Amino acid sequence: MSLRSCKIFVTGASSGIGAHLARALARRGAAVAAGARRAEALADLAAVEPRITPVKLDVTDPGSVRSGVAAAAEALGGLDGLVNNAGIAWGGRALDMAEDDWARVIDTNLSGVFRVAQAAARVMAEDGGGSIVNTASVLGFGTGTGVAAYAASKAAVVHLTRNLALEWARHGVRVNALAPGYIPTEINRGFLEGEAGQAMLKDIPMRRFGRPEDLEAPLELLLGPGGAYITGVTLPVDGGHLCRP
Ligand code: NDP
């Protein structure tokens, strides 16, 4: 029941959760391709962990996704896992949101997740199957002020996960998602460390923000052989955040 010798592509791996999970998977013996736009950050990651191969890709660009997934599969000698994690946030009042900002969030967090999943599933289906884990969010289930596009994109990822699971089971491809609670990273550190962010701790029954390492075991379950009969599920990893009314 391990990820040893699995071939796993992690997107959004140049920082935060993705960088942490790429290292954690490599430490568990997986061969990992790490994808994002910032090639230098990926090179730094590969320099400290030789089981990681950097792959530059932009999930908003269909050509870049095709070549990035092909490069990952070639470097690893196939693909049996995808951590579909790249994402961005835009914070601000919906009344003030510009068309471009709305489009960028949806294109990255929803269309980008679909593009990478589709390209990876094509490779996996040819090789007898694989496992995809998308990164959703507690905001895919709940609401927040100033996160309309982000929350809508993540809710769509939850639903996309179930639909792809339904379609791709016959190809041996499982599709699940993690829904992390708040984890201080580049995407939100400024906000979470401020007064409003700290006030949100009272909404988390376990009274702490998450840490990237909290996602390691849930990811291993969904991605690896232990989750062989699990598909279409979005698993909250949130210190009980979604238990609140
Ligand atoms: P970071 O900002 O640290 O990481 C985001 C990653 O996504 C970076 O590696 C970035 O790389 C990559 N990325 C963004 N846009 C693109 C793009 N167009 N093409 C390729 N890669 C892209 O934030 P987190 O680690 O926190 O976020 C990771 C995921 O977790 C996101 O999907 C986020 O929505 C989700 N999440 C985070 C939570 C949190 O509290 N931190 C809570 C719930 C979900 P680069 O800029 O180099 O392209």
Image (cartoon, rainbow, N blue to C red):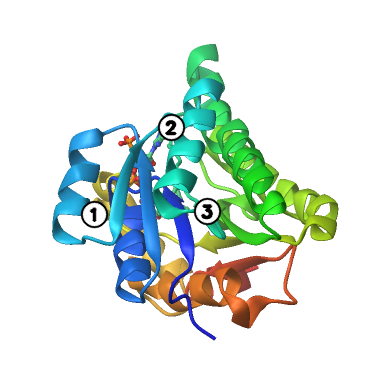
Precedes in sequence: disc 1 or disc 2? 2
| Residue 202: numbered disc | none
Label 2 Cα neighbours within 10 Å, binned few <14 / some 14-19 / many ≥20: some
- Cα–Cα span, label 1 and label 2: 17 Å
Q: How far from the left and from the top, in percent, is residue 97?
A: 50, 19
Q: Quadrant of the N terminus?
A: bottom right
Residue 100 higher or lower than 120, as above or below: above
| Residue 193: numbered disc | 1
| Left or right relative to 151: residue 44 | left
Q: Quadrant of ligand 1?
A: top left
Q: Quadrant of the C terminus?
A: bottom right
- Cα–Cα span, label 1 and label 3: 41 Å
Instruction: Kindly tell me whether residue 176 is visible in this rendering.
Output: no
Q: What amino acid type should be assigned to the residue bearing mark 3? A: Gly
Disc 3 + disc 2, Cβ < 8 Å: no
Q: What amino acid type should be assigned to the residue bearing mark 1? A: Glu
Q: How far from the left and from the top, in percent, is residue 118?
A: 66, 40
Q: Between label 1 and label 3, give the one nearer the viewer.
A: 3
Q: Which residue is mark 2?
A: 90
Precedes in sequence: disc 3 or disc 2? 3
Q: Between label 1 and label 2, give the one nearer the viewer.
A: 2
Instruction: Kindly tell me whether residue 39 is visible in this rendering.
Output: yes
Q: Residue at x 26, y 50 (%)?
A: 189
- Nearest the eye: 142 or 15: 15
| Left or right relative to 187: residue 119 | right
Q: Between label 3 and label 2, give the one nearer the viewer.
A: 3
Precedes in sequence: disc 1 or disc 3? 3
Residue 17 higher or lower than 72, as above or below: below
Q: Which residue is mark 3?
A: 78
Label 3 Cα neighbours within 10 Å, binned few <14 / some 14-19 / many ≥20: many
Point out the residue furthest to the top here. 99
Label 1 Cα neighbours within 10 Å, binned few <14 / some 14-19 / many ≥20: few
